[in-house]
Amino acid sequence: PISDFVLADRVPDHTQLTLWLKVNDEEQPRQYGSPSRMIFALPELIASVTRYHTLEPGDILLTGTPEGVGPVFPGDTIRAGVTELGLEITTPVVAAGETPPGE
């Protein structure tokens, strides 16, 4: 799942964001990180991609994930967010071929 778009003017310094992910009712996040800890800085990644591809409004670059990757199972609920933006999304885990509730 991906959240709604966040306008750039809401993010004065992307390296200062905190991203987190929890499964079910976990108190501590399974994943917790910041773009400041990425191996390659976001401007460097964008420059590299745009040497070969034109980015258009709405394009998304997926860059990987912080440590803490683990299994999830049908019936689990994933919550993820960006602390400083007050952004949070929730998505159910469903078995392959199933339709998520409410869709």
Image (cartoon, rainbow, N blue to C red):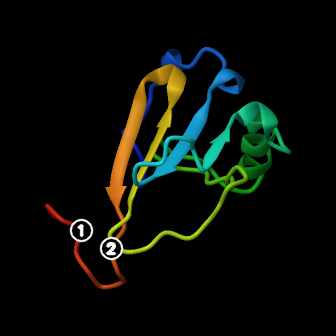
In terms of image quadrants, where is residue 37? Answer: top right
Give percent across and percent down for residue 15: 71, 25
| Residue in the picture at 72% in, 42% down | 46
| Mark drawn on residue 4 | none
Give percent across and percent down for residue 88: 40, 36
Q: Amino acid at mark 1?
A: Pro
- Residue 63 falls left or right of residue 40: left
Few, some or many residues within 10 Å of mark 2 (<14, 14–19, 20+): some
- Helix, strand or loop at label 2? It is loop
| Residue in the picture at 71% in, 35% down | 35
Q: Nearer the viewer, residue 32 or 87?
A: 32
Give percent across and percent down for residue 81: 47, 37
Give percent across and percent down for residue 41: 80, 37
The total number of labels drawn is: 2
Q: Is residue 97 above or below residue 66?
A: below
| Residue at the extreme bottom of the image, as rendered | 97
| Residue in the picture at 84% in, 43% down | 40
| Residue in the picture at 47% in, 22% down | 85
Q: Amino acid at mark 2?
A: Val
| Mark drawn on residue 94 | 2
- Residue 43 falls left or right of residue 71: right
In terms of image quadrants, where is residue 69? Answer: bottom right
- Which residue corresponds to mark 1? 100
Few, some or many residues within 10 Å of mark 1 (<14, 14–19, 20+): few
Q: Is residue 94 above or below residue 10?
A: below
Q: Nearer the viewer, residue 87 or 54?
A: 87
- Residue 60 falls left or right of residue 33: left
